[in-house]
Structures are given as C-alpha cells and as structure tokens.
Amino acid sequence: MSNLKIKNITLAMAMVFGSMSMFAQDKMAHNIDNSNIALSGYSPVSYLDLGLAQKGVKDFKSEYEKVFYYFTSPEQKATFDKDPQKYLPQYGGFCAFGCYAGAKFDVDPNKFIVKDGKYYLFLNNIELDAKQLWLAENDHSRLKKKADENYRTLKTTYN
C-alpha cells in the first residue's frame, strides 16, 4: 500500500474514533437519549419561563452543542435560540440530588424546581422522590455547591 493510502486510512480512522469520542463525551455530560434529545423532549423554556413541565414537539426543535431541545411553539424556540446557555438544565439534565450525592440518575421530567434563574430536575420512582429529599434539606445553597463540585467530575464519567 502506498504511503498516501495509509495516511488517508489513518486519517479516516482518526475522524471516526474522534467523532465516537465526542459523542461519548456528550452522553457523559448530558442526560440525552440515543437521538441526542434532551429533557425527554420537554421544553427548557417552559421550565424556566413558565415554571411548567411541557412536552415540546419535533416541529419546534433546536440543536445546541450537538444536543436537541424541543419546544411548544416557534416563539419558545426563538427565545431559546437567542440565549441557549440560559435555558440549559443544571447538571446536564441529570438528577440534582443525585449529583449532590455523587451519582448521575435519570429524572422524571415532571419533578423539578426553579431557583435563582435556573431549573433543577429530579429522580422520582417508587422508592425515591429526590425532589422531596432536596427540599427537606432546606439548604439549596449547600446542596447546589456540593452538586456543582461533584458534577465537574461526573460529567466526564458514565457513572
């Protein structure tokens, strides 16, 4: 094989593995499904601006940093597109209480709180209502500080 063919094959392999690595990083830092859809399709604008968990629709979607977000209307999409950073879920959409405890958990998109211009999502299942645990602590600042600290490491792991 010629050196040029070997270089081209090597370059192609590097691109494939590089894109796989970038996708893996996205999956580590963001609670997304296999289609890279965040928040189980719920609208980040609804959480923050309306204090509601509203399912978005695929007709109104935006991509930000390789993650897709759905909205309830073209107006919500436009709002997000103007300032996507403002509307990103805390901890990549993983459970805030889980991050506080040092682990990443899926969330129930209907379990959330809005505080200080940000929204936090929580695990809720038969055995655990993480939102109630968070609220029972009655110390949002302390919990957030520890969750922020833990998430710096968690976002680089599969847990």
Image (tube, grey):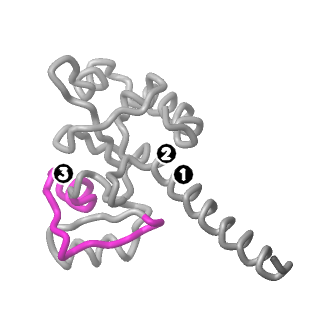
Callout 1: SS = helix
Provide the residue designation for mark 1. Answer: 25
Measured as percent of width and height from the top left, residue 30 is found at: 43, 49
* CB contact under 8 Å: marks 1 and 2: yes
Q: Quadrant of residue 114?
A: top left
Mark linked to residue 71 = none
**Direction from residue 55 to residue 98 in the image, left or right:** right
Q: Give the CA distance from mark 3 to mark 2.
A: 27 Å
Span highlighted in magenta in the image: 43-66
Provide the residue designation for mark 2. Answer: 28
Q: Residue at x 71, y 73 (%)?
A: 9
Q: Give the CA distance from mark 3 to mark 1.
A: 30 Å
Classify mark 1: residues with Cα within 10 Å, few (<14), some (14-19) or many (20+).
some
In reply to whether residue 108 is colored magenta, the answer given is no
Q: Quadrant of residue 77?
A: bottom left
First along the sequence among labels 3 and 1: 1
* Tally of marks: 3
Provide the residue designation for mark 3. Answer: 51
Measured as percent of width and height from the top left, residue 112 is found at: 24, 40
The residue type indicated by label 2 comes to Met
Measured as percent of width and height from the top left, residue 94 is found at: 37, 40
Callout 2: SS = helix
Measured as percent of width and height from the top left, residue 19 is found at: 57, 64
The residue type indicated by label 3 comes to Gly
**Direction from residue 38 to residue 46 in the image, left or right:** left
